[in-house]
Image (tube, rainbow, N blue to C red):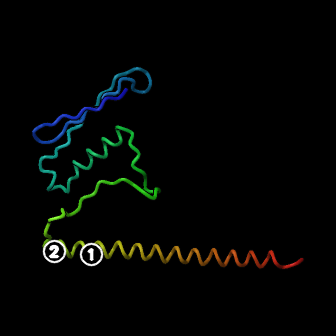
Amino acid sequence: MVDLKLEIVSNGVIKSVKDTNYNGAGEVREIRTVYETENDKNNSYDNTMRLFYDISDDLGIDMGNKFDRNVLEFKIGWGTHFEPNLKEIKRLIKETREELKYLQDLEKNIKFENEIQQTIDDQSDKKDETPF
């Protein structure tokens, strides 16, 4: 059995995972990890996100993988009442343009692959119609 315990400390969270049947041999194994979250806002919430991902992994929660259509992710974004400055807006516009270019390139490649497949299918159909 695996027990997961979270302790709040002054500068973050301590996560303890205790496995009472480690490797199926009845051994007891305990791992303690400290996540410093006190000033994590300055680090883009890296430690907080790592804590969430690690807890999900410890609990065996399937969050998907890079090949799945839907993947559960922890992301950082602007608050609903956040007022960005000009530099932040320009950075978001740049990132959005890069993502749009990636999607447009992907769309172009898929259309090209579909056209090639259609040509192959048409040629195959013509061969089937030709009497021998």
Q: Residue at x 18, y 39 (%)?
A: 13
Instruction: Kindly identify the amino acid type of the residue bearing the numbered disc 2.
Output: Lys
Q: Residue at x 51, y 75 (%)?
A: 109
Q: Quadrant of the N terminus?
A: top left
Instruction: Kindly identify the amino acid type of the residue bearing the numbered disc 1.
Output: Lys
User: Circle 2 — which element?
Assistant: helix
Locate residue 32, reporting x and y percent.
24, 33
Locate residue 34, reporting x and y percent.
20, 38
User: Circle 1 — which element?
Assistant: helix
Q: Which image quarter: residue 83?
A: bottom left
Left or right of 65? Residue 34 is left
Give above or below for 113 relative to 12. Answer: below
According to the picture, the residue beneath numbered tag 2 turns out to be 87
Which residue is the extreme one toward the right?
132
Give above or below for 120 relative to 78. Answer: below
Q: Residue at x 60, y 78 (%)?
A: 115
